Amino acid sequence: MAKEIKNSQETSAQTEVSNFLRQIIDSDCAHATYANRSDSKGNILPSVITRFPPEPNGYLHIGHAKSICLNFGLAKDYAHLTNGARCHMRFDDTNPAKEETEYVDSILDAVSWLGFDWHHNGQEFQFYASDYFDTLFAFAKILISTGKAYVDSQSAEDIQKNRGNFTQVGSPSPFRDREISENLDLFEKMRSGVFKDGEHVLRLKIDMSHPNLVMRDPVIYRIRHAHHHRTGNTWCIYPLYDFTHCISDALENITHSICTLEFENNRPLYEWILNELHQAGALKAPLPHQYEFARLNLTYTLTSKRKLLQLVQENYVDGWDDPRMPTIVGLRRRGYTPESLQLFCDRIGVSKADSWIDMSVLEQALRDDLDPKVERGTAVLSPLKLIIDNFNAELEWCSAPKHPHHEDWGRRDFALTKELWIESDDFMPDPPKGFFRLFPPKDGQPGSRVRLRYGFVVECTGYDIDENGNTIAVRVNYFPDSKSGTPGSADYKVKGNIHWVSVPHAVSAELRIYDRLFTDPHPASGDKDFLTLLNSESKKVLHAFVEPSLAKAMPEQRFQFERHGYFVADRLDYSENKPVFNFAVGLKDQWKK
Ligand code: ATP
Ligand code: MG
């Protein structure tokens, strides 16, 4: 198993090595590799152009966020160059069956929400590989004409079988030496719809005994009578990834084409195709280069669109934006901010070696981002009534800072009354040693004293039970001269400090408490069936009481609920009449062993 990275010290060690891409770009800038280029209209081109090239076949996940932060981030970092730098948004949409406009829209939303955009000097750089279908077709014909591609009429199974394997060289197709004119004719016929799916393919003529299997005459076009989300029924042949990607990069004048490590073996093919087209005069130098980095693997979750789709389609989660999903829409609904995801990506860095990042690193980035910038609030998740027997006033106003380190943000005011809601586990009728919260008098000893946060010190005098013996109310007396912030209040020394909301003022709220989606740190590795490793406790809905000001939150406003953790007003379901908050992350790492 690859190395596992568990905390930010380890991630910073990782970032040390992470600038290998920056070193490459710096060196290209120093050598003017991509300087002095201009586009077909004569405009000077930036010396650094990256791209983010998702396939619109699902919602983006945290792994894509890494690629987005990397590609768009490099363009930002090198914006100071004389001709600037930019990152293109490109949809790699050459597979008609799986791609949909819904996904295109969600991807654009996710990238802009993360804080990036694909405009440069007032121009938009959004592209679709499908825009290049005509050019790709023309380039394929150039390769046929130079004897570098041929139409193969073997079945898919025979092509696979004759490719050989690591120990055995491949055997050439009986169609490998077709005449150029016959190849051109057949390829045109493939395009015009004369053949059925699978009858022919177009292959490059490279080397059937090449040690790298990718180079054994790869297929670059296949027949697919299918509707495409953008080109409709115009095409019935579609180019494959290896052919499309490098050419799209070259057509867009990309300089550094950054992809994940599994494409390392495809790099020679990337170079082969571009060089052949360059030699044939179809493409101008300098050509783009491919560089690989390690994909993000995050524990307790999945980073595969296909598997995430399965969770959605088979209703294991409540949709792509379920707050337990590692999708960008899911993380957003969970309370993650764009800044927290960028911070996470900065911390994990970019390396050339595969590793696993522990989920706690992501959670810590959220905490670190939210702590200084969100207001505090009070929520009682599991309410138990507290009655202050000697409190005879109607109410007493108390107040707390909106943020402990930002006095300038002002204060929240809330009423203290005779009856309060407290957390049921802040009281124990018969506590073990070391329990510092509320417990009743016992064996001649008085009951415990605690401070009601921002209010008074109270002493427990007893508790009420129902006919089944369940505690239904805790009884206390308060000390009128102990109010927080008043002279002498500090003379009361108490070990417990509990939160509360006034019964008549409390607002009921739905709190959705989320936990990790899987119980296993690597739910999809080896031959594990991830569907059997789902955490059955990953979602709980609580009917809680919150302080009145929390009924006036904005959807998507984030808070720290004191003593509990960070919550976000649900962006879809929250309203003043029915406040709904999602649990984002705890105050501390609860999973730490
Ligand atoms: P999936 O396996 O989830 O479908 P993919 O790689 O097929 O992912 P694409 O839409 O092709 O998804 O990916 C767009 C870009 O995001 C690619 O450049 C890809 O390398 C990158 N990417 C995808 N997953 C990760 C990941 N886990 N870590 C880093 N980058 C990723
Ligand atoms: Mg892909």
Image (cartoon, rainbow, N blue to C red):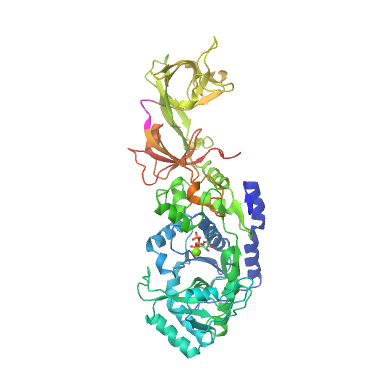
Residue 26, given in percent of the width and then of the height, sits at 64, 66
Residue 486 in sight from this viewpoint: no
**Of all residues shown, which one is farthest toward the left?**
577
Residue 243, image x, y percentages? 51, 75
Query: Is residue 353 or residue 524 the one in the foreground?
Result: 524
**Residue at horizontal 58 percent and vertical 53 percent from the top:** 346
At a point 46% along the width and 45% down the height, the residue shown is: 335
Report the front residue among 470 and 415: 470
Residue 517, image x and y in percent? 49, 46
Give whichever of 487, 544 is nearer the camera: 544
Q: Is residue 497 above or below residue 276?
A: above
Q: Is residue 458 above or below residue 305?
A: above
The chief SS type of the magenta part is loop
Query: Is 400 located above or below residue 450 in the figure?
Result: below
Q: Residue furthest top?
A: 444
In magenta stretch: residue 506: yes
- State yes or no: residue 196 in magenta: no
On the image, which quarter does residue 123 sit in? bottom left
Q: Is residue 199 visible?
A: yes
Q: Is residue 119 left or right of residue 216?
A: left
Q: Quadrant of the C terminus?
A: top right
Q: How many marks?
A: 0
The magenta stretch is 503-507
Quadrant of the image occupied by residue 48: bottom right
Q: Is residue 51 above or below residue 473?
A: below
Q: Position of residue 356 (x, y in %)?
A: 60, 52
